[in-house]
Image (cartoon, grey):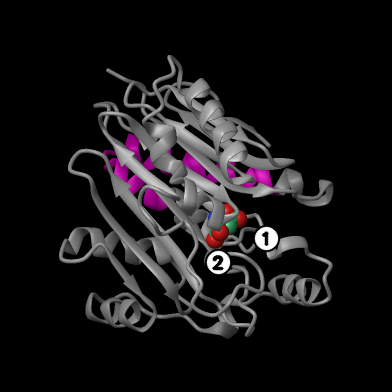
């Protein structure tokens, strides 16, 4: 039997020293919340969803409440989740304000008819399955507005926010799941879709290879297909697979970002080429390990 494990990240980027402790504490709480779901008999999908929801609720992260704004000052949220037994996935993109985009991705996965829905269609699907919409007033934070202002004035380089969230899970049976959620990059064009909701790019899970959630400049992650590349790495250890894939990502497409990775044997790899990427590992029977 494998000791179940939940790994979380709170986005690659450069989180300032003033917020770093809170950032790391939040991803640790989220990983522990996910592990608690597994220990209470929940599934790996339940655990990954719960971990990501905890961070979507926290305005500190660029996902759900507190997500980054488009150039028009609106919220367009992206999220996905995928499980490795049957390669089922669900994803939403350009979603108007909903408290938990990952919950909608999960509903889509369970529904099974489509893998991804965008914008208005995703909102209609939510209504059909009884998931309530939120409002811009409830979900757009002062700090998201300040980030957009900073970007407009040229103070936020590349419009890259950091603070995207993700989780990967391996249960006692070696079944893996990955989930990722984001507001995207600051000042993005209306309609821009990043890597987060794209299976193979921002999120990937396969019980034969592992589960990976990515964060970083979405355009580069999309071009490289980072999540699947990490999972399919032939390296002996999960850590080496994560590190080698990230190095290739940097070399081939000048990518910047980070990944969390779990193999079906429960071993974990974490890599980034940015200054920070808050992350935590909550493993059954062990103290949670967290860092940046
Ligand atoms: N990858 C996300 C996107 O491009 C942003 C991030 O991870 O910070 O939408």
* Residues shaded magenta: 23-50
* Distance from the alpha carbon under mark 1 to that under mark 2: 9 Å
| The one of 238 and 168 positioned closer to us in this rendering | 238
| The one of 16 and 248 positioned closer to us in this rendering | 248
Task: Count the numbered circles shown.
Answer: 2
**Residue 158 on image: x %, y %:** 72, 62
**Residue 75 on image: x %, y %:** 55, 77
Is residue 164 at least partly visible in the picture?
no
Residue positioned 60% across, 54% down in the render: 217
Q: Is residue 220 left or right of residue 174?
A: right
Q: Quadrant of residue 204?
A: top left
Q: Residues within 10 Å of mark 2 (few under 14, many from 20)?
A: many
For ligand 1, tell me if the residue under mark 2 lies within 8 Å. Answer: yes
| Dominant SS in magenta | helix
Farthest top residue in view: 236
Regarding mark 1 in the picture, which secondary structure is present there? loop
Q: Quadrant of residue 117?
A: bottom left
For ligand 1, tell me if the residue under mark 1 lies within 8 Å. Answer: yes
Disc 2 target residue: 183
Please tell me the numbered disc located at residue 67.
none
Disc 1 target residue: 161
């Amino acid at each position: 039997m494998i000791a179940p494990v939940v790994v979380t990240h709170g986005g690659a980027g450069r989180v300032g020293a003033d917020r770093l402790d809170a950032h790391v504490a939040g991803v640790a709480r989220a990983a522990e919340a996910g592990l608690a779901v597994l220990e209470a008999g929940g599934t790996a999908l339940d655990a990954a969803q719960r971990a990501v929801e905890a961070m979507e609720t926290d305005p500190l992260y660029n996902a759900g409440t507190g997500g980054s704004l488009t150039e028009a000052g609106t919220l367009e949220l992206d999220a996905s989740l995928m499980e490795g037994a049957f390669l089922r996935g669900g994803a939403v993109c350009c979603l108007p304000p909903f408290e938990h985009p990952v919950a909608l991705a999960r509903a889509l996965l369970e529904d099974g008819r489509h893998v991804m829905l965008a914008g208005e269609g995703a909102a209609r699907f939510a209504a059909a399955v009884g998931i309530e919409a939120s409002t811009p007033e409830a979900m757009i934070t002062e700090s998201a507005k300040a980030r957009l202002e900073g970007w407009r004035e040229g103070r936020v380089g590349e419009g890259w926010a950091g603070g995207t969230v993700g989780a990967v899970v391996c249960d006692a049976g070696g079944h893996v799941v990955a989930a990722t959620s984001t507001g995207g990059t600051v000042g993005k064009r209306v309609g821009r879709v990043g890597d987060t909701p794209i299976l193979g790019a921002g999120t990937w899970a396969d019980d034969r290879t592992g589960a990976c959630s990515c964060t970083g400049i979405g355009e580069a992650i999309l071009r490289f297909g980072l999540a699947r590349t990490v999972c399919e790495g032939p390296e002996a250890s999960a850590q080496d697979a994560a590190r080698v894939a990230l190095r290739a990502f940097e070399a081939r497409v000048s990518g910047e970002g980070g990944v969390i990775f779990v193999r079906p044997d429960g071993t974990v790899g974490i890599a980034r080429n940015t200054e920070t990427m808050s992350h935590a590992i909550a493993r059954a029977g062990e103290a949670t390990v967290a860092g940046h």
